[in-house]
Image (cartoon, helix red, strand yellow):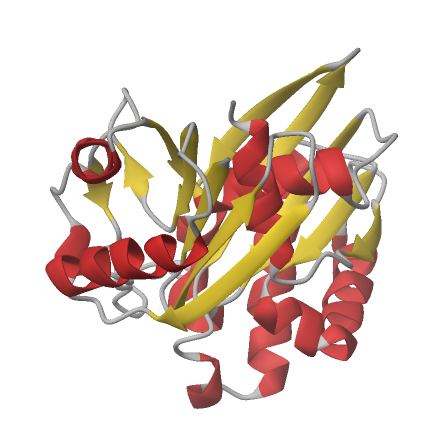
């Protein structure tokens, strides 16, 4: 059997799969405590609850910027006690199996490409808006998927602006991230978000955007307004079509199977 782990700034989800080709079997969801030792122990205990066979592999999506070899957490700005920790090695030592770790937005994008609205699309941007903001470009080459990860939420949209949890000033996430949106009026959120997307699309135009993440999926009317502003402000590229993921919280978990 295989295990998928989706680690976000608010929640952690673990799931079991009978095989890489079988549907998701069981999910357990619990709070992220932002205490690495306690979070890792909760992951261990909840995975044990899922087991009915030997683990062949564990795929992980984590809300963090990772080292080049995908083993170490370099900057997990919304779960900063994880910074510097070798998550891959720790999980390998606990479960004695192969562990693959990737950024959570990239894992969700792979899940969307393989199981969701990305099926049949040659290229698209998966844009996630939850506790944090992130995104990954996906391009399909036959049966193969190329992911181009980026830190879209940490583009600077306001010079000398608000301090973001990543340490920069003026990030898109500092104005529109799930951890801060209640402090800003809706009009400003839409304005900043539209500006960020216009910047992204001028650099890397795509025909399709798929929105995921709890904030996007629970506030679709805001995304509609954002995309209307994007369409009105794009002058050098064609505005993309957009749609919403219908995989919900399963997106990232399903994406962990694509890592293998």
Q: Nearer the viewer, residue 170 or 131?
A: 131
Query: Residue 224 at what x, y percent from top left?
Result: 80, 69
Q: Nearer the viewer, residue 241 or 50?
A: 50
Compared with 197, 221 (above or below) is below
Q: Nearer the viewer, residue 33 or 96?
A: 96
Q: Nearer the viewer, residue 9 or 125?
A: 9
| Residue found at x 65% / y 44% | 126
The image quarter in which residue 11 lies: bottom left
| Residue found at x 37% / y 51% | 63
| Residue found at x 76% / y 14% | 143
Query: Residue 170 at what x, y percent from top left?
Result: 35, 61
Compared with 201, 69 (above or below) is above
In the displayed structure image, the side of residue 208 where residue 26 appears, left or right: left
Compared with 151, 146 (above or below) is above
Compared with 171, 182 (above or below) is below
Is residue 2 visible in the rendered image? The answer is yes
Query: Residue 186 at what x, y percent from top left?
Result: 61, 85
Which residue ends up furthest to the top in the rendered image? 142
Query: Residue 131 at what x, y percent from top left?
Result: 44, 68
In the displayed structure image, the side of residue 112 where residue 136 appears, left or right: left
Total numbered badges shown on the rendered structure: 0
| Residue found at x 25% / y 67% | 163
The image quarter in which residue 108 lies: top right
Is residue 157 visible in the rendered image? The answer is no
In the displayed structure image, the side of residue 198 where residue 43 appears, left or right: left
Which residue ends up furthest to the front in the rendered image? 52
């Amino acid at each position: 059997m295989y295990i998928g782990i989706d680690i976000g700034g608010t929640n952690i989800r673990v799931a079991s799969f009978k095989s890489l080709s079988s549907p998701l079997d069981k999910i357990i969801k619990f709070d992220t405590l932002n205490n690495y030792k306690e979070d890792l122990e909760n992951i261990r205990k909840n995975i044990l609850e899922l087991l009915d066979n030997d683990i062949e592999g564990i795929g992980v999506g984590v809300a963090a910027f990772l080292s080049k070899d995908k083993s170490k957490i370099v900057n997990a700005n919304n779960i900063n006690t994880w910074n510097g920790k070798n998550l891959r090695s720790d999980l390998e030592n606990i479960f004695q199996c192969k562990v693959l770790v990737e950024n959570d937005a990239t894992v969700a994008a792979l899940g969307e490409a393989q199981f969701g609205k990305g099926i049949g699309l040659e290229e698209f941007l998966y844009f996630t808006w939850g506790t944090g903001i992130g995104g990954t470009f996906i391009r399909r080459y036959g049966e193969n998927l190329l992911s181009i990860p980026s830190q879209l939420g940490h583009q600077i949209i306001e010079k000398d602006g608000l301090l973001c949890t990543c340490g920069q000033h003026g990030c898109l996430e500092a104005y529109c991230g799930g951890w801060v949106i209640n402090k800003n009026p809706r009009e400003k959120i839409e304005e900043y978000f539209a500006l960020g997307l216009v910047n992204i699309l001028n650099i890397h135009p795509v025909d399709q955007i798929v929105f995921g993440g709890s904030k996007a999926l629970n506030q679709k009317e805001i995304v509609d307004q954002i995309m209307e502003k994007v369409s009105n402000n794009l002058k050098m590229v064609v505005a993309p079509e957009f749609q919403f993921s219908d995989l919900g919280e399963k997106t990232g978990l399903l994406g962990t199977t694509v890592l293998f």
